[in-house]
Each structure stands twice: as structure tokens, then as C-alpha cells.
Amino acid sequence: MDNKPLIIEQEFNAPLELVWRAITEKELMKKWYFDIPDFKPEVGCKFHFEGGEEDKRYMHLCEVLEVIPNKKLKFSWAYEGYTGISFVTFELSFVGKKTKVKLIHEGIETFTNPDFKRDNFVGGWKYLIHESLKEYLENGKALRYW
């Protein structure tokens, strides 16, 4: 069993404030991540969203645990009806004129459902950070909100 946190890092050719908005404003989040109408970047905010494959959908239950504007967002991540709880942290920093995002997902090993195995999270987060968020931030779509 791999108990190490899953870490995905990516540099974006985008202003840090815009990257922060992309991970904390629900109108921007749905353009690259999920549509989460009840999300607010406030400690104690409970939010949920459905995800998974077309034939297997899971309700994600989350709660915002830490917010440091333009630096850090941390929330819990669990599934309705299943054991286990994990924690997702987005850390933002400047790297020259670029913005670095470090995503840390801890506690994946607490999930017992085989659909929630580490490899699935690796693939999902790599797609979301390396492809979906990168394309959103760098292809001009996000700049209209800037």
C-alpha cells in the first residue's frame, strides 16, 4: 500500500492571481474542473459534486479546511456511502514570471473501493492539472476574465 501523498506540479504561463481565481471561483472552475455550484473558498464551506465514468457516478463530499488567498486551498475529499477520507491541497507560488501549482492529495489509501485506487487519482489529476487547467489558462479562454 502506497501511503505517500500524490503530488502533481505544473508551471503555468499565467498570472498567479488568475490561477487562484481559476481554482476558487465556481464560474471559472467549471470551465476546466467540475461544476460545483455550492463551492465558496471559505473555511467550513461544505460542497459536493458528482464525478466518475458515465456508467459509474460517485458523489464527492468535501469541506474547505484552509484558505490563504493566492497561496493555498485545502479541502477534505470523501465519497457518499463509502469509507475513507482524503485531503486535497493546492499550493501556488511564483516561478519567475510563471505560476507554479503544486497539488497534494493525501489519504488516498484510506479508500477501500477499488475504483478509488491511487492510479485512478494519478491519471485524473494529471489530466486536470497538466492538460485541462493548462489549456484553460494558456489558450486565451481564461484571459477574458482577467
Image (cartoon, rainbow, N blue to C red):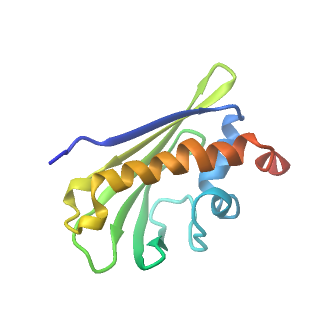
Tell me where residue 48 appears, x and y as whole percent. Answer: 47, 73
Task: Name the outermost residue toward the right.
Answer: 144
Tell me where residue 31 appears, x and y as whole percent. Answer: 68, 60
Number of on-image labels:
0
Residue 81, relative to residue 76: is it above or below? Answer: below
Figure quadrant of residue 58: bottom left
Q: Residue at x 69, y 22 (%)?
A: 97
Using the image as rendered, state which of residue 74 and residue 140 is in the foreground.
140
Residue 13, relative to residue 109: is it above or below? Answer: above
Using the image as rendered, state which of residue 146 and residue 35 is in the foreground.
35
Task: Name the outermost residue toward the front.
Answer: 55
In this orientation, does residue 79 appear? yes
Direction from residue 8 to residue 134 in the image, left or right: right
Figure quadrant of residue 120: bottom left
Figure quadrant of residue 20: top right
Task: Name the outermost residue toward the left.
Answer: 1
Q: Residue at x 65, y 51 (%)?
A: 22
Quarter of the image with the C terminus in it = top right
Tell me where residue 46 appears, x and y as whole percent. Answer: 46, 70
Tell me where residue 122 appears, x and y as whole percent. Answer: 38, 48
In this orientation, does residue 48 appear? no
Q: Residue at x 27, y 63 (%)?
A: 85
